[in-house]
Image: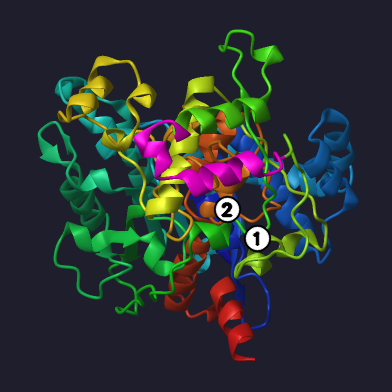
Amino acid sequence: MIPVIDLFAGPGGLGEGFSSITDESGERAFKTIMSVEKDEQAHKTLRLRAYVRSIKQKGKRIPHAYERYLQKHDAKSFNELITYDPEAWEAAGIEALCATLKEGDTSLVEEARARLKRQGVQSGRPWVLIGGPPCQAYSLVGRSRRTHDREGLEADPKQTLYKCYLAFINELQPTIFVMENVKGLLSAKHEGIGVFERILGDMHEAGYEIHSLVKQEPRGPQDYVVEAECYGIPQARHRVILLGIKKESEHKETDILTPMNRLTVREALEGIPRICSGFSSRNKGWREMNWASYVDSAADELLETEEGKKLKEILLRVKSSRPPKKTSKSVVSGKSGPYAGWYRGGLGGYRVLANHEARTHMARDLDRYLFCSAYAESNGISAQLYDFPSYLIPAHKNAQAAKEDKEVEFSDRFRVQLYDRPSTTITSHIAKDGHYYIHPDPEQCRSLTVREAARLQTFPDDYLFEGNRTSQYTQVGNAVPPLLAQQIAVVVAKYLGVTARCFFDELEEGRES
């Protein structure tokens, strides 16, 4: 197995992709020997996944203890789980480090050097460095909100964290590296110099040629942007991904990713049970409020408006439908989308579904979610504020301008993830509120759950996210989709002389047979 070191690992999406592809003999092509994440909750997710992966690689099925932990997620079931294989749990703690990468601090570089030496890298064995420095400072949305804080933006320490990544490259000279970041990186500046150009210069100086994963001969910065929806990911996620290869390497040509059929939100969420949301404690008298009665009244109120009358058939269906359960921890039997083998395959027949609890909402937001999801079902697009009944337009000044058809910043602040398209980008913003991530089913009248967001990011259902729900959303939003990472890993493996297979190869073989 080819050793991998994963920096800024988050919950482990990029590492999951590399760790889950196999060679021609069915063995794992890559092995993560060290992953680094500073956030304690994300690290808990990372370590747990390393543990589960270790159990699987020993040829064992997922233990009942893990199924119980997915179901109950409490201290007792956790203790039962980690005592199932204490050695593997200890090894997972060694592999996944909770540590902060800091510019000028070489301790983690030296730790990596020692681990690589034990893997025989000094004798010429190839190895791979993967990861993406925290990207919020480069985010186009983040930057637009800080337009008047240019000095603060350019001095943001997150803009220099790539130097920690660069230190690993300079000191340890990986055979190949994969570096992922947001599209805003292409136009960001630091101390007046383009960040992307600076990174390319640094990498060339370190002895690497930078390749694109989508263009054989990239002609400009945009040619390094991978549009995930073009590669079988049910999400329009556009990210800069750099493939760095040592200049003295024997091989010069690299493969690029192969375009695939697009997967829709409907297909990705197949089998996930319907649930309803609840009322936030900020609602006066929220304990006495009844969700089904409230949604029924909200539909009646909408039907009295011109906008609502156009949605009559859908709203009447909502009123007559049986209210969803408040929670469900089992998938719907008999329902499976095209990626069922990936999403559910690791659970060995267990129907358990973790991280699928709806968040609570302000009452008036339920009205908005009902309108937006019904509008999206009827029109095939997500409503703008200009399309709203006037009583549903938020009270703040900027939004109220929509009543007079004046220009409104973020007029799409309530966005439905349309059933028959890939979703929009799942980002860490989903942790703050659900307005950009409204479920397309009007009968559920809520935002996406952590599990639904994870499905759109192509995390398998046996991938448990630790921490509180806000942290879980953040982890999912910051991650690299594992099925995209798998395809990148296949490209890397082939360059290193290993013919590897990913889920899509198995899917294609299943279609042909």
Residue 232 percent location from the top left of the image:
46, 67
Q: SS class of the residue under badge 1?
A: helix
Q: Which of the 4 image quarters holds residue 403?
A: top left
**Left or right: 402 as drawn, with respect to 306:** left
Residue 367 percent location from the top left of the image:
49, 29
Residue extending farthest to the top is: 284
Q: Which residue is mark 1?
A: 343
For the residues labelled 2 and 1, the Cα–Cα distance comes to: 8 Å
Residue 293 percent location from the top left of the image:
65, 26
Query: Foreground: 108 or 354?
Result: 354
Query: Foreground: 136 or 169?
Result: 136
Query: Foreground: 496 or 472?
Result: 472
Q: Which of the 4 image quarters holds residue 257?
A: bottom left
Colouring mode (rainbow / by chain / secondary structure / one colour): rainbow
Badge 1 crowding class, 10 Å Cα cut-off, few under 14, some 14 to 19, many 20 or more, is many
As drawn, 323 above or below 402: below
**Left or right: 384 as drawn, with respect to 4:** left
Residue extending farthest to the bottom is: 513
Q: Name the quadrant of the N terminus.
A: bottom right
Seen at 71% across and 42% down, the residue is: 322
Magenta region, residue range: 303-324
Badge 2 crowding class, 10 Å Cα cut-off, few under 14, some 14 to 19, many 20 or more, is many
Seen at 32% across and 58% down, the residue is: 242
Q: Which residue is mark 2?
A: 455
Instruction: State which tag comes first along the sequence, 2 or 1.
Output: 1
**Left or right: 332 as drawn, with respect to 96:** right
Mark 1 residue type: Tyr
Is there CB contact under 8 Å for labels 2 and 1? Answer: yes
- Is residue 148 at least partly visible in the picture? yes
As drawn, 292 above or below 81: above
**Which numbered circle lies on residue 362?**
none
